[in-house]
Amino acid sequence: MDDFYSFSFKQTSALVALKNHQYDDLDYYKARNQLFNLSVMADYDQLVCLPSLTNIDKYWYQIETARRVLRQFGGRALLADEVGLGKTIEAALICKEYFARGQIQSLLVLTPASLVSQWQSELAEKFAIDTVTTDDKHLQQDLTEFWTEHPRMVASLNTAKSAKHLPLVTGRSWDLVIVDEAHHLKNSRTINWKLVNSLSKRFILMLTATRSKIPWLNCIIC
């Protein structure tokens, strides 16, 4: 080849130290790395989970919704986009971000029975969040164990509010609760509403396309 290339490096303090075999103890590096990570985690300007999500289309409005829920609403919000705009993706994105930051360990998704398997597959395939569901009858030989031993669950509202399951669902704490089709809660006199309201939860996301008809959902979020 006729072309030759040469490289030169600026004499920085780091380069001089490297040449002279001068370096800090590994513990100092680890401490600085932890401080850097803490600075990133201090706010939600950047979603740390995004690079790991390769199976979804990332729309700016969904990312912005997730950031706003995390930063301004403290993980307690009503997602009331129109049908087809991706409320499920927004909720799962928020969920994944909390998992990525180590801020949650347990998850409960409450949904109509017809959507249980869909939620399970979406979380697993698009967000790498594995769950068990109330469709898994072979896991329910011991209901107490079923509700206490599994940290990430997708449950149908009808199953969760049943006499056998209700005391167990409400008898433990959940880091994040997601309620899909939240208009099924109807009003504060229904069992659905009382179930969700009585859950011990740090964060809650309510998904619906009919917000104007259900102002009482705000009572659960606050």
Image (cartoon, grey):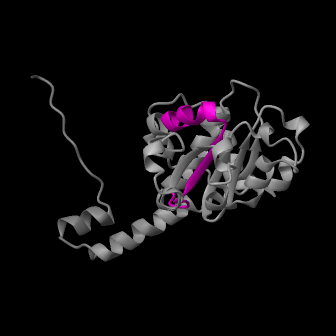
How many numbered marks, from 0 up?
0
Identified at 50% across, 42% down, the residue is 50
The residue lying furthest to the left in this view is 1
Q: Position of residue 110 (x, y in %)?
A: 65, 45
Q: Quadrant of residue 174?
A: bottom right
User: As drawn, is 125 to the left or to the right of 5?
Assistant: right
Q: Position of residue 89 (x, y in %)?
A: 60, 35
Q: Magenta residues? A: 101-122
Is residue 183 visible in the rendered image? The answer is yes
Is residue 47 visible in the rendered image? The answer is no
Q: Nearer the viewer, residue 74 or 122?
A: 122
Q: Is residue 119 above or below residue 192?
A: above
Identified at 58% across, 42% down, the residue is 93
User: As drawn, is 31 to the left or to the right of 71?
Assistant: left
Q: Position of residue 86 (x, y in %)?
A: 65, 30
User: Is 108 in the magenta?
Assistant: yes
User: As drawn, is 92 to the left or to the right of 81?
Assistant: left
Viewport quadrant of the N terminus:
top left
Identified at 83% across, 32% down, the residue is 210
Identified at 52% across, 39% down, the residue is 135
Viewport quadrant of the C terminus:
bottom right
Q: Position of residue 51 (x, y in %)?
A: 45, 41
Q: Nearer the viewer, residue 155 or 20?
A: 155
Q: Nearer the viewer, residue 71 or 83?
A: 83
User: Is 66 in the magenta?
Assistant: no
